[in-house]
Each structure stands twice: as structure tokens, then as C-alpha cells.
Amino acid sequence: MFQHYVPQMYLKRFADARGQVRVYEAGRDDFYLSTIKRVAGENDYYRARINGNPSNAVEDMLSTLEHDAERSIDRVLQGAFPILNPDRTAIAVFLGFQMVR
């Protein structure tokens, strides 16, 4: 399973009308276009073994906090002010996880 270290909900804000972003790889002199589904991630990046069995528990947890953050970010971008504590928390948790990814 392809798992993103930069969430799709974040990447889509930089995508063109076809859902593509420009990708620059260090060490290359140019860029290429790719869909957000196939950039900024790796296969089984967050796959863990729990009791000897493969698990997507980390991916599932990240998906939940990304969903919460996306809703909060959307509210802020739509002009919600003051920013309510649940939105502040969701965005702060998202940013904290982004820093350690």
C-alpha cells in the first residue's frame, strides 16, 4: 500500500486542475508532473508488525488526524475567526506529526 509522508490533503492544495503537482527531485535539474496519489510517499511506509502480524494501525491513526486537520484548515481558510480550540488542537497535532514524519 502506497502511504504518504506528505498527506494528500496537503498536496491537493498545490495541484493543478488535473490533480497534478510539479515534482522536483534533489540532484535533478528539472521537474516532472505527477498525480498527488503517487508522490511524497512509499509503499508500506508506516506498515508495522503487531504480534507478528502486519498492521496499518499507524496509517489509520494518521488518516484520522489528517481528516480532522483538513476540516479545521478548511474552516480557517473560509474565514472562521476566532479559531476555536478544537481547530487549533487539530492543526497543532497535524503540524507536530508532520515535523516527525
Image (tube, rainbow, N blue to C red):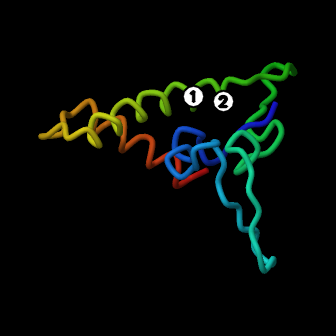
Q: Are marks 2 and 1 in contact (CB under 8 Å)?
A: yes
| Of the pair 50 and 96, the residue shown nearer to us | 96
Packing grade of label 2 (10 A; few <14, some 14-19, many >=20) is some
Question: Looking at the image, which residue sits at the far left?
Answer: 82
Instruction: Residue 71 in the image: state x and y as whole percent.
Output: 38, 29
| Quadrant assignment for the N terminus | top right
What separation in Å lies between label 2 and label 1 (alpha carbons)?
6 Å
Q: Residue at x 78, y 32 (%)?
A: 47
- What element does badge 1 sit on? helix
Q: Looking at the image, is 78 positioned above or below residue 41?
A: above
* Kind of residue at disc 1: Ser
Any mark on residue 59, and which?
2
Packing grade of label 1 (10 A; few <14, some 14-19, many >=20) is some
| Of the pair 93 and 68, the residue shown nearer to us | 68
Q: Residue at x 81, y 36 (%)?
A: 44
Q: Looking at the image, is 74 positioned above or below residue 13?
A: above
Instruction: Residue 83 in the image: state x and y as whole percent.
Output: 18, 39
Q: Residue at x 36, y 35 (%)?
A: 90
Q: Looking at the image, is 55 positioned above or below residue 88?
A: above
**Left or right: 85 with respect to 69?**
left
Q: Looking at the image, is 91 positioned above or below residue 67?
A: below
Instruction: Residue 100 in the image: state x and y as whole percent.
Output: 57, 52
Residue of label 1: 63
- Image quadrant of residue 81? top left
Question: Looking at the image, which residue sits at the far right?
Answer: 52
* Kind of residue at disc 2: Glu
Instruction: Residue 70 in the image: state x and y as whole percent.
Output: 43, 34
Any mark on residue 101, and which?
none
Q: Residue at x 45, y 48 (%)?
A: 96
